[in-house]
Image (spheres, rainbow, N blue to C red):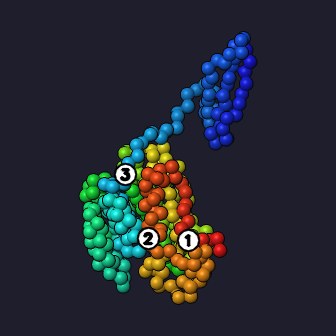
Amino acid sequence: MAWSATLVAPRRFRTYVRCSTDAGGNPIPFHSGSIFGEERGQASGAAVAPRESPKRVESREMKGNVAIVTGGATGLGRAVALDFARRGVHVAFNYVLLPNRDIAAQALLTETALRGLGIEVYCAVCDVRDADAVNAFVETSKAELGGVHYLVNNAGIAHDGALWRMGDDAWREVLDTNVTGAFHCLRAVAPAFRKQHYGKIVNVASHQAYTPGFGIANYAASKAAVIGLTRSAAVDLGATNVNVNAVAPGFVRTEMLAKLPPEVLERAEKESLLGRVAEPEDVAHVVTFLCSEEARHITGQVIVVDGGLTLA
C-alpha cells in the first residue's frame, strides 16, 4: 500500500488529501483534514468545526423589496432613493437637521416624489452617530414597510481644513458620521439579513480615499476606513448570502459641489477623462445595480465612479 500527500489549495485554505491504493493500484476513498485543526493544537484525527457554508438562494426581483438609504433627503442619497423607487422598491430614508438649510422641507419633497412613483415610504430624523437612534429607525422601517433587503450607507459630512489647523471636533465629527455611522447601520440590519439569508449593502466611499486633495485629512481617512469596513463586512456576512460592496464617486453635481470654488469644478472637469463631473444618477445607477441579482456574485469590491479622474 502506497501513500501520497498533495497540497490542493492556497495556505489560507490548505488541505492535505491522503490517497491510498490497494495491491491492484485501485484507489481507496480518501480522507481530508484542515491544517487549521492541527495548527490550533488539535489532534490530526479530531473533528474540526466546519465553516458556515452559503446556501443556494433563488433569484428574486427587486420590485416589492425594501431599501434603507441614509442621508436620502438630498443629493446622491435622493438620487439613489428615486432609482430604487423606479424599480418598485419601497424606501426608508433618514436625515438630520442642519443649520442654515431647510432639510426637513427637502425631505418632504423627496418623500412626495417617491410616493409619486407608486411605492411606500418611511422618512424620519435619525443621526447615524447615535446607535440607539439607528436601531430604532431600522426597526420602525421594517415594521412600516414589511422588512428590509437593501442598505445604502450614504450619510456623510465634510469639515475641510489644513491638517495643522484641524480641531478635534472637526476630526471626530467626520469620522463618527462617515465611519461609525456606517457601522451602526450595518450592525443594525445584519441580524435581519442573516436570518432571511439575503441582503445587499452598498457603502458610499470616495475617490479621495485613493487620491486626496489638500485639507481633507479627516474626510479622506474616513472614506478609506469605509473601504476597509466594506471588505471586512463582506467577509463576515458572505456565508449568509449578504453582498457588501462600495462605490467611490469622484466629483458629483450636488449641493456640496456647488459650494466649491468655480476653479475646483473646472479643474475636475478638465482632469476627468470623460471631460465632465458625474450627475447623481450616474452613481445611483451603479448603487442599484450592486443591489440587483445581476450583481449577486460581486462582494467586497469598490466600484470607482469618477469618469477616469483617478487615472489622470
User: Looking at the image, which is closer to me, 102 or 286?
Assistant: 286
Could you say which quadrant of the image residue 201 lies in? bottom left
CB within 8 Å, label 3 to label 1: no
Indicate the position of residue 122 as horizontal and vertical percent values.
28, 64
User: Looking at the image, which is closer to me, 53 or 76?
Assistant: 76
User: Looking at the image, which is closer to me, 180 or 101?
Assistant: 101
Q: What residue is shown with label 3?
A: 61
Q: Residues within 10 Å of mark 1 (few under 14, many from 20)?
A: many
Q: Earlier in the sequence, mark 1 or mark 2?
A: 2
Indicate the position of residue 150 as horizontal and vertical percent values.
39, 56
Tell me the tag on residue 306.
Answer: 1
Furthest residue toward top: 23
- Secondary structure type for disc 3: loop
Position of residue 122 relative to residue 272, above or below, is: above
Q: Earlier in the sequence, mark 3 or mark 1?
A: 3
Could you say which quadrant of the image residue 103 lies in? bottom left
Q: What residue is shown with label 2?
A: 281
CB within 8 Å, label 3 to label 2: no
Q: Given the image, on which type of amino acid does mark 3 rest?
A: Glu
Indicate the position of residue 218 as horizontal and vertical percent values.
55, 73
Indicate the position of residue 163 as horizontal and vertical percent values.
60, 79
Can residue 133 be seen here? The reply is no
Residue at 46% over, 84% down: 258
Residue at 44% over, 67% down: 284
Q: Given the image, on which type of amino acid does mark 1 rest?
A: Asp
Q: Alpha-carbon distance for marks 3 and 1? A: 29 Å
Q: Quadrant of the N terminus?
A: top right
**Badge nearest the viewer, 3 or 1:** 3
Could you say which quadrant of the image residue 99 lies in? bottom left
Q: Alpha-carbon distance for marks 3 and 2? A: 21 Å
Position of residue 220 relative to residue 89, above or below, is: below
- Secondary structure type for disc 2: helix
